[in-house]
Amino acid sequence: MVVVATHIVQHPLAQHLLTELRNRETEPSRFRQLAWTLSTLLILEATSGVSLSSRLIETPLEPYEGQVLEHGLAIVPILRAGLSMLEPGLQLLPDVAVGYIGLERSHETAIASSYYCKLPNLSGRFTVLVDPMLATGGSAAQAATLLKFHGAEKLVMACVIAAPEGIGAFEKAHPDVPVFTAAVDRELNGQKYILPGLGDYGDRLYGTL
Ligand code: PRP
Ligand code: URA
């Protein structure tokens, strides 16, 4: 099977926002604002491959053959940190269905276990899986498997920071699913945190440090 590429969002604003997110001095309220804007950029980029179909409408002056999205969309955050990418997606995307996948990594093994899953039928929808951190890739790979089981065919993954190890593991499990990210960092540490990274995204978002 063809392996699709990892896309690094090139907009300078994405790098500016990410640097502020990484800064340990950034407080949760500011972190949430930055996360919102950066997620908007990421989701825009991740949905750049949606197909269009033509639609005839009337402007106030004459008929016009315009273009509209051919298929509905779906957005699925991985709880809990992925919730920060949901609202920006809902603001941006028309006709969007929402699913939720709850996964939590063990602090000892870094293996994610599932505690919640509620998904719409995804067949025929362009589906965006969102989770800000792709570390070992275990959570995203499990989630993508669930999404395919629920009918997802056109599937993309959007994250804020990816580790090379996570990209490798995710590509191996789902070579057909492109990853859109603001950065590919250096490596994972012994506890499977991304370096340089930004720490624990969920904790920084919700102040649970
Ligand atoms: C974080 C993050 C991802 C996962 C990435 O979630 O939001 O879901 O770790 O790690 P992986 O690629 O090694 O699987 P965490 O399990 O800490 O839960 P939280 O979102 O509730 O903080
Ligand atoms: N989850 C996070 O929130 N941060 C990491 O660096 C790795 C996993």
Image (cartoon, helix red, strand yellow):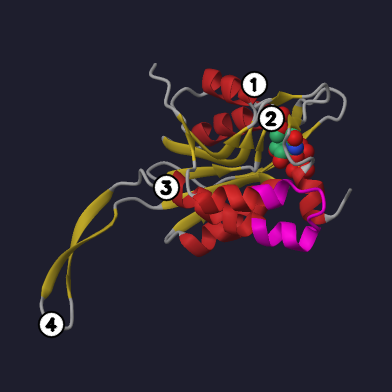
Residue 161 lies, with reference to residue 71, above or below; the image says: above
Residue at coordinates 18% horizontally, 78% vertically from top-left?
A: 59
- Mark in front: 1 vs 4: 1
Judged left or right of residue 34, residue 176 is left
Read off the residue under disc 4: 61
Can the viewer see residue 115? no
Read off the residue under disc 2: 135
Residue type at the position of mark 1: Glu
Judged left or right of residue 69, residue 126 is right
Say which quadrant the N terminus sits in.
top left
Quadrant hosting ligand 1: top right
**Label 2 with label 4: CB-CB less than 8 Å:** no
Please give the label number shown on residue 165. Answer: 1
Judged left or right of residue 198, residue 149 is left
Q: CA distance from mark 3 to mark 1?
A: 24 Å
Read off the residue under disc 3: 47
For marks 3 and 1, the one nearer the N-term is 3
Residue 196 horizontal/vertical position (percent): 73, 34
Residue 166 horizontal/vertical position (percent): 63, 25
Is residue 78 within the magenta segment?
A: no
Please give the label number shown on residue 208. Answer: none
Q: Is mark 2 within 8 Å of ligand 1?
A: yes
